[in-house]
Image: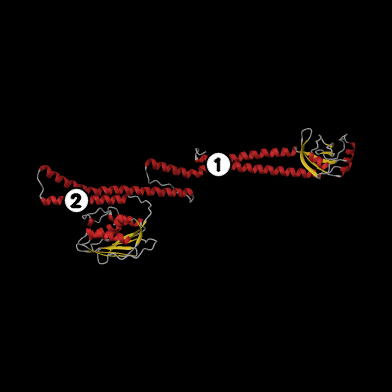
Amino acid sequence: MNNLPLRSRLTILTASAVAVAVALAALACWLITRNQLSNQLDSSLKAVRPDPTQLVAAAQNCPANPQGGQVAPSFYTVRLIAPDGKVCLVFGDSPIPATAADIAVADGRDRISVHDATAQNGTPMRVVTYQDHLRSIGFTASVARPLTENNHALDTLAWVLLAVTGVGVLGAASAGLWIARAGLRPVDTLTGTVEHIARTEDLNVRIPVEGHDEIARLSTSFNAMTAALASSRDRQQQLIADAGHELRTPLTSLRTNIELLERSEATGRALPPEDRRALLASVKAQMTELASLIGDLQELSRPDAVRTPDVVPLHEVTGTALERARLRGPDLKLVADVRPWFVRGEAAALERAIVNLLDNAVKFSPPGGEIEVRLAGGQLTVRDHGPGIPAEELPHVFERFWRSPTARSLPGSGLGLSIVARTVQQSGGEVTLTPAPGGGTLATLRLPGAPTAPPDDPAIT
């Protein structure tokens, strides 16, 4: 059964269910009809009362068994039964032997007996034996009627019901096949689309959605899945293209510097010490930029898998990030007001995000400038006093590899803020960059607190 196509299985199951239902209904109809016919026959037999005078005369002539005299309609058989089982046929085509039930009525143990019997000529009979005044002369009366009419009617009904059942099963199979085809047509469309996508890798194909049933929900979910896959593939291709573009510049610079060193060694003409130091410093800076870019790419390539977040003390993470920022901007003044706040997330990822915000502020702060950092009530703000970000560039600051035209000469890969946005989003928060009053840029990071109440920690300054 499991090896059959779904359409065939639905057809077989539908036909089988209808066949069972029709068969049970037909059987119930036949049994009810048989019971009604049997009750009607019993009622008619109980209502028959042969002429007592004729019965007495027949009893007196027993065992001569006269068969003359019309004491009952022709389709009835009337007989007399003695307590010892002797039978005298009063009227009928063939004698009916007395049964134990008949004798029980004849000897007074039962008042009436209704049962089936078979005449000597093989005719099935329905028999009613009842007590009457003939017991005073040693007999009781018994009336019988052939079951031929009832059996013929029941046989005819059985054949009719069998034919109806067969027609019903065939009709159910046809209807089941039609329903299976109509019901599975959207599934066939979905299957064809999936096969087309597997064959061509075209994720832009969409399935038409009709109605609001389960198939429509499945089609909607499939369309959403293919759209997500297409978007993911586009982002991946864009990431590869952008990464290749960003890697080209430091690699070209490294190759140029290394070729200069190689040419100097090959020709035997040493570079002036100042030029050699500058060249090595450039190589070191390019290597640092490459390492930073590769680290950013690794961070962005991590899958957005569902992780169980830990309770992270954001104030401690911010303190560690501040120490790193002071090393990167030793001539800058960092003013911090950090209050205790606990969040759910990854400590390393949150530290990297805050470091990126601080690096951005360090990069654009003027020499000897001041950076203000404040954490209170789940809101972390980083404010610098640099040139600020033009309003038309603010919508792009969190895009991958996007760099302001005024900042393209500065070191960086354009991935820092996109990593910040991704990390904050994974922790259930939000981050924004806005112009600060009086000049500069204000970065605001909001993260929901952990459900457990944190202890009171002193502020970090």
Q: Is residue 61 left or right of residue 368?
A: right
* Left or right of 229, for residue 260: left
Whole-percent x, y for residue 194 in the image = 42, 43
Up the image or down, 204 lies above or below 446; here it is above
- Indicate left or right for 373 with 47 as reference: left
Residue 13's disc is 1
Instruction: State whether residue 398 appears in this view.
Output: no
Instruction: Say above or below: 253 vs 371.
Output: above
How many residues crowd mark 2 within 10 Å: few (<14), some (14–19), many (20+)? few
Residue 16 position, x and y percent, is 58, 41
Q: Residue furthest bottom?
A: 438
How far across and down, in percent of the image, does residue 442 sit?
Answer: 28, 63
- Kindly identify the amino acid type of the residue bearing the numbered disc 2: Lys
Q: How many marks?
A: 2
Provide residue 66's location: percent of width, then percent of height.
87, 35
> Please, what secondary structure does the residue beneath circle 2 have?
helix
The label number, if any, that marks residue 284 in the structure image: 2
| Helix, strand or loop at mark 1 | helix
Q: Nearer the viewer, residue 306 or 256?
A: 306
**Mark 1, residues whose alpha carbon is within 10 Å: few (<14), some, or many (≥20)?**
some
